[in-house]
Amino acid sequence: MKNMNTPKNSSLENESNQITINTIATLIIVLLPILGAIVGIKLTLDSQVSLIDIGMLGIMYFLTMIGFDVGCHRYFAHHAFQTTTAVKSLLAILGLMSSQGGLLYWSVGHPLHHKLSDQPGDVQSPNLEGNDFWGKLKGLYNAQVGWVFKIANDGNDPENIVKFEKAIKDPLILKINELQLVWIILGLIIPATLEGLITMSWMGVFKGFIWGGLVRLFLVQQFAGTISSVCHMFGDRPYKTNDYSTNNFWLAIPTLGGSWHNNHHAFPNSAYCGLEWWQIDISNWVIWILEKTGLIWDVKKPTPSMIKARKLQNSSTN
Ligand SMILES: [Zn+2]
Ligand SMILES: [Zn+2]
């Protein structure tokens, strides 16, 4: 019956196959780290955790979370600074390893999270499923992990691709983005290989894969998820914004500063999310070092008077 397919039918068939492949790949990327975390708990209970395991987890977590927060979010979504091709390529690779959606989402989709914040069309919002307990719970799930399934097929839309290419311009970054799955897999292989070489054992390969690979991916996914879920439902709102964005001090360290999310909605183009001296923002420190070493420039941040004026806006609308 194959020859009865018109070209249109066959392209529809290809598209639906692609949608299925993308959804299955997303499901594996979400489920596999959960299994890895369960193995990690078992190894911990059996006292099978070494300093090398913890080091591998910590280093890989830091690098991929920086890739996500400084790269995907502050640079590719908000253009909060300018940088060299080498630095932006590295940020893109580390960001894609974090499995928080591709650069197409961050440069084309995430601006809608700010434009439509907590209104229909904002895929990262936890506040669109009703105000009762189950609505809130479903909303939290959506903002925590559900949204990655919603954006899994954004790249099939030709209009999105045109917008993406216009936003990125650089063919090298477009190529890096096409290889997203390769970077995610490399993010599992690299710690496995390193720990195998350090310990010269297959057990080292296995533990590097679990701790630096899967447990790290699980923690990155879940803590990055809290920026959309928890930081749009619970916490402080020092700035009045047209959404429910909040700051959460207790998430500042694991999110590397991403949890100063109400600040971020008040000043979306700022490279700095922590705006007070006491607001720990590790990504700010990385950005500061990169700026001092000349690797990035034109770093956008609000002046103290802009911050003061924004706070005064609060009292005038009270
Ligand atoms: Zn937000
Ligand atoms: Zn943002």
Image (cartoon, grey):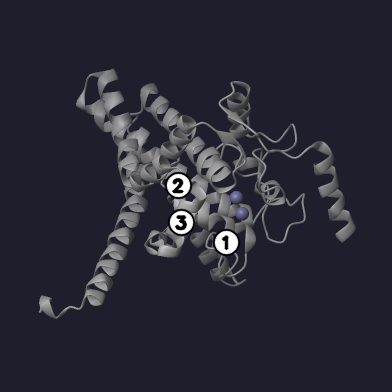
Residue identified by numbered label 2: 221
What SS does tag 3 mark?
helix
Three-letter amino acid code of the residue under disc 3: Val
The picture quadrant where one finds residue 117 is bottom right
**Which numbered disc flags the more N-terminal residue, 2 or 3?**
3
In the rendered image, residue 38, in percent from the top left (x then y), is placed at 34, 44
Mark pair 2, 3: CA separation: 8 Å
**Which numbered disc flags the more N-terminal residue, 3 or 1?**
1
From the Cβ of disc 1, is ligand 1 less than 8 Å away? yes
The residue carrying pointer 1 sits among few (fewer than 14), some (14 to 19) or many (20 or more) residues within 10 Å by Cα, namely many
Mark pair 3, 1: CA separation: 11 Å
Residue identified by numbered label 1: 125
Residue at figure coordinates x 54%, y 41% from the top left = 69
Three-letter amino acid code of the residue under disc 2: Gln
The residue carrying pointer 2 sits among few (fewer than 14), some (14 to 19) or many (20 or more) residues within 10 Å by Cα, namely many
Query: Which disc is residue 262 wearing?
Result: none
Asked if the residues shown at circle 2 and circle 3 are in contact, with their CB atoms under 8 angstroms apart, the answer is yes
Residue identified by numbered label 3: 145
